[in-house]
Image: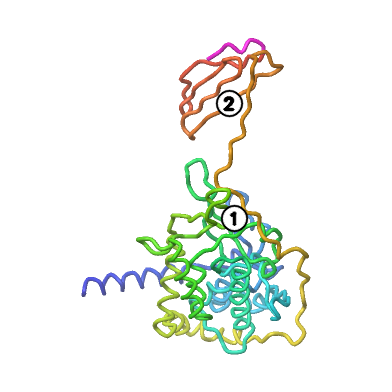
Amino acid sequence: ARELLDRLNRLIKLAQAQASGMNMSFLFDAERRLFSIGYNVQECRLDGSYYDFLASEARLASYVAIARSDVPNEHWFTLGRPFSVLDGRTTLLSWNGTMFEYLMPLLLKRVFSGSLLETAYKAAVARHINYGKARGIPWGISEAAFSALDNNKVYQYQAFGVPGLGLKRGLEQDLVVAPYASMLALPIAPQKAVANLKALESIGMLGRFGFFDSIDYTRQRRPEGERGVIIYATMAHHQGMSLVAINNFLNNNLMQQRFHRDLRVKAAEPLLYERVPTKPQMSRIPPGYEATPKLAPLIQAPVSGRFLTPHTAIPRTQLLSNGALHVMVTNAGGSYCRYHETDITRWRSDTTRDNWG
């Protein structure tokens, strides 16, 4: 036990040293009063895109930067606050409409009764629940892995959200549910979150290391098969957020208490008291955002072609590769084989004779 305590104390000191040595102001555009998405090291300049919405995971970084006096308080009030009416509620909108944007900062930041952010949390969770019911699936959409694979058979990853809640166009085209989104919703709708997690468990989403990352309802296993493709992957940051959310739920928001013990964090708390404006500026939701996404089968028939003659104006080719070994063959019999940068067979580009390989 003594060794464990010593190790934890060393980790605490290391984390404190790293945090105190970090200055976020180099990512801040003083003219726009916004944080840039990133910094281009090669060109020595800020990227041209900015975190400009209050309903964003980046507001946790904004809050910390203000508390540390890295950036002025005015930055907080520069963040966009677009509103709309969804399901009869005045709702603060985000860019992607994800649970992550709304609820991730809640892992550390307190929520004050009647505040703008409390209203936003409740409206976002309610919208996700209603959207899931309307689609006949479990609710909770966020950025996650989905069923597309790259050349190395690695799942691809992107932000998915609820249309209408997010201003980004095309959100209705995808339908990917992530269990960690339900974990984040525990402080807002605990009973519904637990029921949703049980529903996800019942369809095979719970594995040895916790819930799998997501289930992709945009695709299905067979043209007339069971809906949804489970993404058999676990991501450390999603599991970490889930564990913190569970810890907060079971232990009276312990991580929030620890975060707000810092006097600088506590001094910035008035920013969190902001109320919903009496007459908020409303954003128009584009028509058709409720459209049901088209389900595409996971396995589709490959595109094929037959060539019955070698005498074509240009060679017709078939290419095969696993990322290391590359093979090409033409309808005239020309071909080559290459492993990385090494030619296994000799070949020369000759569209007239096409006799190499």
- Specify few, some or many for label 2: CA neighbours under 10 Å numbering under 14, 14-19, or 20 or more: few
Residue 96: x %, y % from top left: 64, 64
Outermost residue to the front: 224
Compared across the picture, whether 73 is left or right of 100 comes to right
Residue at left offset 60%, top offset 15% = 332
Q: Main secondary structure of the magenta part?
A: loop
Residue 166: x %, y % from top left: 67, 67
Rendering quarter of residue 170: bottom right
Nearer to the camera, 262 or 340: 340
Residue 286: x %, y % from top left: 77, 65
Residue 241: x %, y % from top left: 46, 69
Range of residues picked out in magenta: 352-357
Q: Is residue 353 magenta?
A: yes
| Amino acid beneath label 2 | Gln
Q: CA distance from mark 1 to mark 2?
A: 30 Å
Q: Is residue 29 magenta?
A: no
* Figure disc tally: 2
Colour logic: rainbow
Residue at left offset 54%, top offset 56% = 227
Outermost residue to the bottom: 113
**Quarter of the image that includes the N terminus:** bottom left
- Specify few, some or many for label 1: CA neighbours under 10 Å numbering under 14, 14-19, or 20 or more: many
Secondary element under disc 1, as helix, strand or loop, is strand
Compared across the picture, whether 224 is left or right of 236 comes to right
Residue at left offset 57%, top offset 52% = 219
**Mark in front: 1 vs 2:** 1
Secondary element under disc 2, as helix, strand or loop, is strand
Would you place residue 190 above or below residue 352 in this image? Answer: below
Which residue is the site of mark 2?
318
Which residue is the site of mark 1?
218
Nearer to the camera, 250 or 331: 331
| Amino acid beneath label 1 | Thr
